[in-house]
């Protein structure tokens, strides 16, 4: 008897939710909120759940049945045709009425999507993840939402900054690019007219990621202010795994520092300095979308001024922690093909006339480009991100850039 | 010409009336915002070609053409840049626009003349940013050497958000930025230094905002090495390199530079920047004086400084009220004053965004021009000669006060005392009034002038002035400041004890209401008798259909009340007290002079008791109402033996009623408290009631376990107890449960005095089976965990209101009765019924009493546990 109680308590202590899920005394939690007559949208502590594409998908393809028909087929027998909870099915406990806006796990579309997908344990509400597609559940969630009272969510469209005819530069707090990666309170987003967004941390001016798609949602001025930006386009390239090494190296201890940004000549550029005030090498960097038969990608352009012939910076080819699996000398470009630990292929190309390839760092893959001596230089580095690497891709790089 | 004549006529119309009106002398015109745009202004200046340029909190920069056109609607807005990380300070130098962003000082250039800034050069980013939401950077004055000045807000983190912290370099500092971008920290000890300016003497001035270590909103005269009192910034100085050396509550023991000026809290709760009038008279008679932006009350304040024995001090007075959340002011080339509005994130008077210009009509007001301190009083000079040959001492009312320098949020005015005016005299030109009075260094005085008139009986436009006395001429260093070191205030937890927060969490659950909605509410700028509402949770407003009263479900007789309220113009509501009396909340701010009637007590017999003084600041502003109410004593048949009393009623800390008898024809005993919904529009928030109650525990049976929990079932085991005794408290940590040996308890009352931490969660159980205790009837002890029932919830009734703050002792009473309907449970917190639940299936006939900790982060302290049989009253 005693040991039985002991084990139950231990479960409870370690994982209260798990304990409840086991049905252990769950009878009084299972009814949670059902007696709550309060419209949750009026709560002082509203929990906003932004609509993420990865959960409730945007309705891109039309479901086989309309949302209304889906509701009739799957929901109405319990929840009623009008969503008032007066369905034909006799239940121990009446199904939820959507009319007064009460939803077990919140009234955002995401929350309703989750409820439809997973069901509500301990109640007659089943999960439909296996029987309905993402599109159908998304459409259904949107429809169920319309049965309730109007929600108070601010339109996110008000906060989306788009790139139109001219490029746009945004400064602000960048969110983490992934688990274990830091936020950057000083960040920079350059939105190009070609749909490419480059994301820099400002403190040492390093390119963190390249995105493609919509530009950025600005939530930093909402509410009390100061929240991170929300770049919208998916990341197509996480440079150096999100913690890239310095782009150029001059001397140890000298980091690049931001000199400014421009949106001249139809391009968004970041300007930075290398070195000290007396001999400041000035770099203008901008990015363009780039297509090659071997794969999609982008090109980073560097316009370098005020070079000091005695202190020439080297460019560090990204991906030094990745295995070099090939080197190809194609027309006008040398290509270095690398494979990451995750099997992803990353190809970097440069014009050998613009710089000399040297292996310098302590690691085998740490390749540098030495700029020609002079007071100014230009450099263009192509990054291709092909889905796979095979002989035909190799041939495309070797023979030329267009079919 | 015509407009000047009209203005003159308007001004003449004011003459002979009791009240002068600001807009007779200065006109206020609001610019029409570009369609659909919200311009929360953070910086304003003028380009050499006369165009205006403004930066916003939302990171946009606008160029405004024709800003000074006689017809303000001919101004044209062009978006010149966007995507900045805030722009809370702006300065034009030659053709270039300098803007301070959150993380850098930048220079914006339009290289091709298309009114778009293509290039943003970084001048410096040499200060820290941790990412905290409150790490604003403010600016942006420039001195004669070309140096810019920037001030940096401290950050606020939970828990203890009210202790500002400096977690990256130069937070809480004022910085000098040389033309080459070199950053030099100049002065420390600031908190939320929203506005900067340089006066005609070249003094660098910074305004700050009240909060921890900042008693009210000061104007600081900043010199190299100054420390203004907020300790967080000291982290970046010798001796305080680690944050361990900085206490959040103890003063740091570092010499403070006194603020040049403390603006009365009633005038300014959020101060913006300040600019000197260098218009050569184009803006009126106040040449060289300072004009200060004010957000919360939507005001422009006028200030003037003087140096006494090397210490800067001075005076301020109202200039122009109710124009919008003024965050920035700047003088235009034609001598107009441009005001930029911002309120998002700070709150303020509507409109909360956009721009306005204030122009002098040329009609000279009768106004206090200057006030200068003398060894034995003040000399007050007026803009026009006073009409009377003599002004008696009775026309001058002087009040002195000081502040507390402490960690708590702001300071009430302390030691408020009348200062006797012993003599008054008028200069031969009748422009200067000399006041003789015993004045003390280290205090502020508020002087009110009554009945003083200029030529033709023209009344004073503003009859109040506040002077901050750091030094009295010839008096030397008093060794004391206006903001004085005092004993540490009680902790916030201690002050929360016993209060039920009736709108915290779920704002509606503990009330009966209809026709009320929750959202952000502010006055409709087009019709100030109405509210505009946005999604949010700041206010509960009766803008719905046929609003009812908003009535507590619990009942009270003797209690303290605390709530916030806001009224639109002509708004009216009231707090209905048990027994029939009402504290009336009524706005009159549409009437000239804003006569005081807000806070009248309307008694049960219909009689009105007007407030003793006007503490109400006007429509659209949030006020705090506090009241201490004593219930009536009733006879056996409900007759009133002793009427109830309003022991004290106050608005924003100013007492408006002393002890008032609440006469009523009949008594009701305990009753609900209600916010009237049918008298007019009102917004309110955060109603808290501290009920007076007591349990005579001598008539109960204590079942508090002994120190070794002997005779109790302890889980998980006696060998690794999670329960311990200290300071007469049974302390439960991490997990576990204990239950009475006796599992035969049925109907009874169970009372426990307990405390739980933020994030902690436990239940008291009734009729619990010893082998499966969670099958018992639960009463929840949980102050904050939002996804679970909150404290006081019994059975399946789930409270979602955070009635009690964490770490507070609460008296949780649950009554358990078997009736024909089932097992009825009622939960009371601090004597107030908060939840009811019936188990119609009678699932549990009897069982043990126990406590179970449900979350590993729980710290549950139990002071006592008592029971009594169900048949006792």
Image (cartoon, helix red, strand yellow):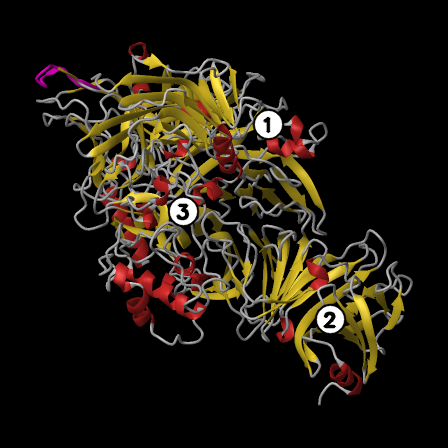
Identify the residue at image location x=28%, y=61%: A147
The residue marked by circle 2 belongs to what chain? A
Please give left or right for residue B808 compared with residue A316 in the image: left
The residue lying furthest to the bottom in this view is: A403
Instruction: Select label 1 or label 3 by which is in front.
Output: 3
Q: Residues within 10 Å of mark 3 (few under 14, many from 20)?
A: many
**Gap in angstroms between the C-alphas marked 2 and 3:** 53 Å
On the image, the x and y values in percent for residue B631 come to: 20, 20
Q: Secondary structure at mark 1?
A: loop
Q: Position of residue B535 (x, y in %)?
A: 36, 52
Q: What is the crowding at mark 1: few (fewer than 14 residues within 10 Å), some, or many (at least 20)?
A: some
Q: Which residue is mark 1?
A: B257
**Residue stretch in magenta:** B635-645
Q: Looking at the image, can residue A148 be seen? A: yes
Q: Nearer the viewer, residue B554 or B625?
A: B554
Is residue B568 shown above or below B626?
below
Q: Residue at x 30, y 16 (%)?
A: B695
* B746 relative to A313 in the view: left or right: left
**Residue A11 picture location, percent across and down:** 51, 38
């Amino acid at each position: 008897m005693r040991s039985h109680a002991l084990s139950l308590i231990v479960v409870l202590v370690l994982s209260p939710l798990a304990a409840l899920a086991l049905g252990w005394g769950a009878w009084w939690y299972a009814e949670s909120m059902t007696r709550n007559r309060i419209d949750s949208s009026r709560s002082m502590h509203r929990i906003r759940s932004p609509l993420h594409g990865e959960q409730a998908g945007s309705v891109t393809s039309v479901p086989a049945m309309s949302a209304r028909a889906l509701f009739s087929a799957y929901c109405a027998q319990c929840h009623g045709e009008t969503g008032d909870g007066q369905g034909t099915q006799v239940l121990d406990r009446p199904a939820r009425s959507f009319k007064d806006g009460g939803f077990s796990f919140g009234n955002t579309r995401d929350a309703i999507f989750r409820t439809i997908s997973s069901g509500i344990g301990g109640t007659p509400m089943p999960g439909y993840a296996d029987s309905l597609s993402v599109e159908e559940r998304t459409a259904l969630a949107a429809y169920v939402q319309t049965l309730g009272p109007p929600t108070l969510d601010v339109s996110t469209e008000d906060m989306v900054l788009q790139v139109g005819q001219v490029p746009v530069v945004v400064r602000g707090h960048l969110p983490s690019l992934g688990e274990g990666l830091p936020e950057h309170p000083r960040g920079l987003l350059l939105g190009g007219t070609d749909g490419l967004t480059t994301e820099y941390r400002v403190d040492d001016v390093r390119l963190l990621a390249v995105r493609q798609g919509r530009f950025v949602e600005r939530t930093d001025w909402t509410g009390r202010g100061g929240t991170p930006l929300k770049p919208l386009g998916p990341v197509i390239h996480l440079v150096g795994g999100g913690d890239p090494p310095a782009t150029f190296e001059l001397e140890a201890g000298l980091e690049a520092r931001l000199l400014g940004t421009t949106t001249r000549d139809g391009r968004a550029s970041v300007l930075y300095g290398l070195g000290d005030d007396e001999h400041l090498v000035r770099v203008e960097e901008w990015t363009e979308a780039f297509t090659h038969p071997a794969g999609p990608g982008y090109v980073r352009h560097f316009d370098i001024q005020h070079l000091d012939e005695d202190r020439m910076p080297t460019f560090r080819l990204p991906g030094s922690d990745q295995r070099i699996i090939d080197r190809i000398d194609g027309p006008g470009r040398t290509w270095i093909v690398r494979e990451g630990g995750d099997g992803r292929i990353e190809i970097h190309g440069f014009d050998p006339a613009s710089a000399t390839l040297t292996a310098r760092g302590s690691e085998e893959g740490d390749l540098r480009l030495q700029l020609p001596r002079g007071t100014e230089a230009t450099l263009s580095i192509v990054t291709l991100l092909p889905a796979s690497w095979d002989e035909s891709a190799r041939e495309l790089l070797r023979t030329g850039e267009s079919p | 010409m015509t407009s000047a004549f009209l203005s003159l006529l308007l001004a003449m119309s004011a003459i002979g009336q009791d009240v002068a009106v600001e807009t007779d002398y200065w006109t206020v015109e609001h610019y029409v915002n570009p369609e659909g745009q919200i311009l929360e202004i953070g910086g304003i200046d003028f380009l050499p070609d006369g165009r205006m340029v403004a930066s916003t909190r939302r990171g946009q920069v606008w160029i405004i053409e024709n800003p000074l056109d006689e017809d303000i609607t001919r101004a044209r807005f062009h978006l010149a840049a966007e995507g900045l990380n805030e722009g809370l300070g702006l300065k034009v130098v030659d053709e270039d626009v300098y803007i301070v962003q959150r993380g850098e000082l930048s220079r914006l250039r339009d290289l091709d003349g298309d009114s778009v800034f293509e290039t943003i050069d970084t001048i410096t980013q040499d200060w820290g940013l941790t990412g905290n939401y409150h790490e604003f950077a403010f600016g942006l004055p420039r001195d004669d050497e070309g140096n810019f000045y920037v001030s940096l807000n401290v950050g606020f983190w939970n828990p203890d958000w009210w202790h500002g912290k400096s977690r990256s370099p130069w937070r809480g500092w004022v910085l000098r930025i040389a033309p080459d971008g070199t950053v030099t920290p100049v002065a420390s000890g600031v908190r939320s230094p929203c506005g900067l300016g340089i006066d005609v003497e070249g003094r660098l001035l910074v305004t700050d905002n009240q909060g921890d270590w900042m008693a009210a909103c000061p104007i600081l005269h900043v010199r190299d090495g100054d420390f203004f009192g907020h300790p967080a910034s000291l982290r970046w100085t010798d001796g305080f390199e680690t944050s361990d050396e900085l206490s959040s509550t103890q003063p740091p023991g570092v010499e403070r530079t006194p603020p040049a000026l403390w603006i009365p809290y009633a005038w300014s709760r959020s101060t913006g920047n300040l600019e000197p009038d260098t218009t050569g008279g184009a803006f009126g008679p106040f040449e060289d004086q300072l004009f200060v932006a004010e957000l919360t009350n939507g005001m422009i304040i006028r200030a003037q400084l003087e140096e006494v024995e090397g210490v800067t001090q001075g005076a301020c007075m109202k200039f122009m009220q109710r124009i919008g959340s003024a965050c920035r002011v700047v003088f235009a080339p034609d001598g107009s004053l441009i005001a930029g509005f911002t309120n998002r994130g700070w709150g303020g008077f509507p409109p909360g965004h956009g721009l306005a210009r204030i122009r002098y009509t040329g009609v000279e007001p009768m106004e206090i021009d200057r006030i200068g301190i003398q060894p034995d009083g003040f000399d007050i000079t007026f803009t026009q000669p006073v009409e009377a040959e003599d002004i008696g001492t009775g026309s001058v009312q002087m009040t002195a006060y000081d502040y507390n320098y402490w960690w708590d949020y702001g300071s009430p005015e302390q030691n408020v005392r009348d200062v006797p005016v012993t003599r008054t005299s008028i200069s031969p030109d009748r422009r200067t009034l000399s006041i003789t009075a015993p004045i003390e260094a280290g205090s502020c005085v508020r002087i009110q002038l009554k009945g003083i008139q200029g030529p033709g009986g023209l009344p004073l436009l503003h009859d109040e002035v506040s002077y901050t006395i750091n030094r009295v001429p010839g008096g030397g260093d008093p060794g004391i400041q206006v903001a004085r070191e005092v004993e540490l205030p009680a902790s916030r937890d201690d002050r929360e004890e016993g209060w039920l927060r009736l709108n915290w969490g779920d704002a509606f659950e503990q009330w009966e209401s209809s026709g009320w909605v929750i959202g952000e509410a502010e006055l409709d700028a087009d019709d100030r008798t109405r509210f505009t509402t946005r999604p949010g949770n700041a206010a509960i407003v009766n803008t719905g259909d046929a609003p009812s009263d908003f009535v507590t479900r619990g009942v009270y007789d003797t209690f303290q009340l605390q709530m916030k309220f806001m009224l639109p113009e002509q708004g009216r509501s009231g707090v209905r007290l048990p027994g029939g009396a009402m504290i009336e909340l009524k706005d009159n701010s549409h009437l000239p002079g804003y006569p005081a009637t807000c806070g009248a007590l309307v008694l049960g017999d219909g009689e009105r008791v007007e407030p003793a003084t006007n503490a109400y600041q006007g429509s659209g502003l949030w006020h705090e109402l506090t009241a201490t109410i004593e219930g009536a004593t009733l006879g056996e048949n409900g007759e009133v033996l002793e009427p109830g009393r309003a022991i004290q009623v106050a608005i924003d800390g100013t007492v408006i009623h002393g002890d008032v008898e609440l006469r009523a024809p009949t008594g009701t005993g305990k009753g609900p408290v209600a916010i009237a919904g049918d008298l007019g529009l009102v917004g309110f928030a955060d109603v808290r009631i501290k009920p007076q109650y007591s349990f005579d525990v001598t008539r109960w049976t204590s079942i508090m376990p002994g120190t070794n929990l002997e005779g109790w079932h302890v889980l998980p085991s006696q060998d690794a107890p999670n329960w311990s005794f200290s300071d007469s408290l049974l302390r439960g940590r991490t997990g576990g449960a204990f239950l009475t040996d006796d599992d035969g308890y049925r109907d009874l009352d169970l009372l426990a005095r307990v405390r739980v931490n933020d994030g902690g969660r436990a239940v008291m159980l009734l009729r619990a089976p010893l082998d499966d205790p969670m099958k018992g009837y639960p009463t929840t002890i949980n102050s904050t965990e939002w996804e679970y029932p909150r404290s006081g919830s019994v059975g399946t009734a789930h409270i979602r209101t955070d009635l009690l703050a964490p770490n507070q002792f609460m008296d949780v009473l649950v009554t358990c009765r078997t009736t024909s309907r089932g097992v009825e449970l009622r939960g009371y917190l601090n004597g107030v019924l908060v939840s009811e639940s019936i188990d119609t299936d009678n699932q549990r006939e009897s069982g043990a009493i126990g406590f179970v900790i449900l979350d590993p982060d729980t710290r549950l302290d139990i002071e006592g546990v008592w029971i009594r049989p169900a048949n006792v009253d």
